[in-house]
Image (cartoon, rainbow, N blue to C red):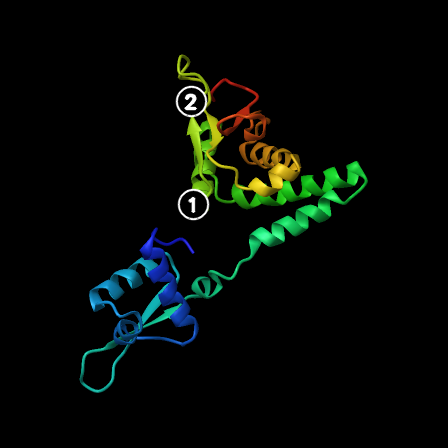
């Protein structure tokens, strides 16, 4: 769930968990449950609606004002139920157990191709620079801290580098650098350019950086 940091995250999650147990709830229901003001509840609900996790519908009973009821969207119902970290570790361990290097490399290639296809469907830039910016934006939207940084401050027309401010797969990468190779495959497929890992945290670098093999901008 991508919610506000700190206490906001906790309170938003409380509302989502409350709605999981009920088909719908009113502001009054949520005030009684959370113990905060109606204004605070509305702020949290607005935030959750902006994220597509909660929806609102109105009910008119008699001649009174309509009553607003809030319920989880399908995305809200799915949120918080993903155990991807454990699944990724188990799957990666199984890939590492494949003895034949050709078969293992083929598996990595197919995984990278599937991941790249998912990103490409949301990337429409005409130039490599535009596609790099869109890719970094998509990764940031998934809470993966990637950034674009100049490759050479003295040559502003060169392509920037993709910088991983922290590794998205820290435990896997420490066990097997094949994860880094897979990431390079994904970026190469998405950008339509050969990408190399020019620096790596595992080698003592501050950040992992990915560069295109052609430094000339397009």
Q: Position of residue 129 (x, y in %)?
A: 45, 28
Q: Which mark is residue 150?
A: 2
Residue at x-position 46% and y-position 46%: 142
Q: Which residue is mark 1?
A: 141
Q: Earlier in the sequence, mark 2 or mark 1?
A: 1
For marks 2 and 1, give the CA distance.
Answer: 21 Å
In the figure, residue 11 lies in which quadrant? bottom left
Q: From the viewer's perspective, tell me whether residue 205 is left or right of residue 76.
A: right
Mark 2 lies on a secondary structure that is loop
Residue 90, relative to residue 29: is it above or below?
A: above
44 or 133, which lies in front? 44
Identify the residue at the far right of this view: 100
Q: Position of residue 136 (x, y in %)?
A: 45, 36
Q: Position of residue 218 (x, y in %)?
A: 47, 22
The N terminus: image quadrant: bottom left
Q: Position of residue 65 (x, y in %)?
A: 19, 79
Q: Which mark is residue 64?
A: none
Residue 61, relative to residue 185: is it above or below?
A: below
Q: Are marks 2 and 1 in contact (CB under 8 Å)?
A: no
Q: From the viewer's perspective, tell me whether residue 113 is left or right of residue 135.
A: right
Residue at x-position 55% and y-position 36%: 190
């Amino acid at each position: 769930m991508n919610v506000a940091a700190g206490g906001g995250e906790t309170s938003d999650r409380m509302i989502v968990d409350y709605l999981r147990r009920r088909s719908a709830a009113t502001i009054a229901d949520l005030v009684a449950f959370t113990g905060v003001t109606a204004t605070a509840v509305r702020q949290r609900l607005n935030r959750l609606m902006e994220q597509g996790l909660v929806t609102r519908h109105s009910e008119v009973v008699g001649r009174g004002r309509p009553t607003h009821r809030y319920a989880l969207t399908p995305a809200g119902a799915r949120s918080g139920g993903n155990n991807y970290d454990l699944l990724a570790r188990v799957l990666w361990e199984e890939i590492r157990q494949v003895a034949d290097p050709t078969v293992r490399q083929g598996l990595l290639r197919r995984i990278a191709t599937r991941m790249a296809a998912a990103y490409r469907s949301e990337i429409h830039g005409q130039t490599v620079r535009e596609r790099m910016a869109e890719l970094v934006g998509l990764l940031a939207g998934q809470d993966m801290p990637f950034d674009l940084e100049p490759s050479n401050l003295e040559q502003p027309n060169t392509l920037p580098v993709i910088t991983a401010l922290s590794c998205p797969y820290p435990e896997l990468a420490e066990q097997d650098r094949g994860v880094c190779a897979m990431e390079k495959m994904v970026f190469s497929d998405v950008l339509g350019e050969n990408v190399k890992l020019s620096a790596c945290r595992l080698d003592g670098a501050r950040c992992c950086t990915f560069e295109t093999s052609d430094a000339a901008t397009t």
